[in-house]
Amino acid sequence: MLSYRHAFHAGNHADALKHLALVDALSYMTRKDKPILYADTHAGAGSYSLGEGYAAQNREWADGIARIREAATGPGTPPAVAAYLAAVDSWRARSGLADAYPGSPALAASILGRGDRAALFELHPADHEALAALFAGDRRVRVLKADGPASIAALLPPPSRRGLILVDPSYELASDYDDAVACVAAALSRFETGTVIIWYPILDRAEARALPGRLQALSSRPRLHARLELRELLPGERGMAGSGLLVFNPPWPLEASLRAALPWLARALGGPAGAPGTGSRWSLASG
Ligand SMILES: C[S@@+](CC[C@H](N)C(=O)[O-])C[C@H]1O[C@@H](n2cnc3c(N)ncnc32)[C@H](O)[C@@H]1O
């Protein structure tokens, strides 16, 4: 059942979108004195090496962070893009590995302060083991080999009433879509004011098309909906044409950060407009 390995996708366009938003939101939230809880319901292995193993097989990062890095050498790089690249570089320096790519747990842990806490859920035995080893000496971080969507409610609300929950499923199975909706519903019902970021793929699959609407119907709390479509989704195709994020209770600077970053990312990561199936689009809605 757990055949998905995030290393195949590390640093791709989807990681870039979600990690840029995560870095921006956490950087703002950790500026205040009160501690926060960061919970990652689908944590992965924590950090990846882009030059070897699964990540080197399909080289998805070449059309993700590598294109972003190249485009960022020009003028006009949005601050949120620059901050995302700086966070990746700082992880590389800390880990001593020039081709390391930090997953959401590593990015979060490098932003969290001494009083903050993290809870990282990962079910895959090998990725759980890697994650546990990565954070073995970090007393702020709990690594749990448990079902994230089923377990998140028990951690909420955090004592400080401040927290960010990242919901980043692999969407391998049709049931992952229902679990994602149930996870966000549980998190917001226990912690109505918590920041919840959920990532979803843009795919020609009924469950994927329905997911953003199902998520938006869950809560009337303030939210942002960002979409980055790198090419037109053609009927019957199997690949991912882009991805989106729903953010409930977004920290207020995130909207401006995404408004500046999304058109830039669409240009840096998308194909040329014109031919069928090409051309990139972005959107950002608040509600
Ligand atoms: C998309 S990856 C996570 C990537 C990570 N959040 C990042 O940004 O670096 C999804 C991960 O969820 C794990 N997973 C799948 N179902 C799970 C569940 N019910 N509870 C916890 N982890 C799960 C998979 O093994 C996989 O490693």
Image (cartoon, grey):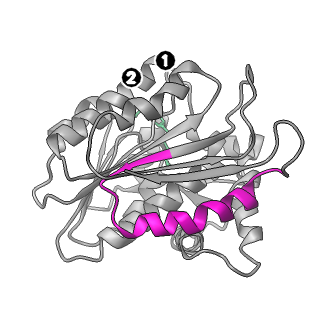
- List the residue tagged with mark 1: 174
Q: Is residue 109 left or right of residue 190?
A: right
Q: Secondary structure at mark 1?
A: helix
Q: Nearer the viewer, residue 123 or 20?
A: 20
Q: Quadrant of residue 24?
A: bottom left
In this view, the residue farthest toward the left is 159
Q: Is residue 125 visible?
A: no
Q: Give the magenta range.
A: 245-271
Q: Quadrant of residue 97?
A: bottom right
Is residue 121 found inside the magenta-colored segment of the image? no
Q: Give the quadrant of ligand 1.
A: top left
Q: Is residue 210 above or below residue 131?
A: above
Q: Is residue 79 above or below residue 35?
A: below
- List the residue tagged with mark 2: 178
The picture places residue 34, in percent across and down from the top left corner, at: 17, 71
Does any atom of ligand 1 lie closer than 8 Å to the CB of label 2?
no
Q: Secondary structure at mark 2?
A: helix
Q: Is residue 132 left or right of residue 57?
A: left
Labels 1 & 2 near each other (Cβ < 8 A): yes
> Who's the residue at 19% across and 67% down the image?
35
Is residue 264 found inside the magenta-colored segment of the image? yes
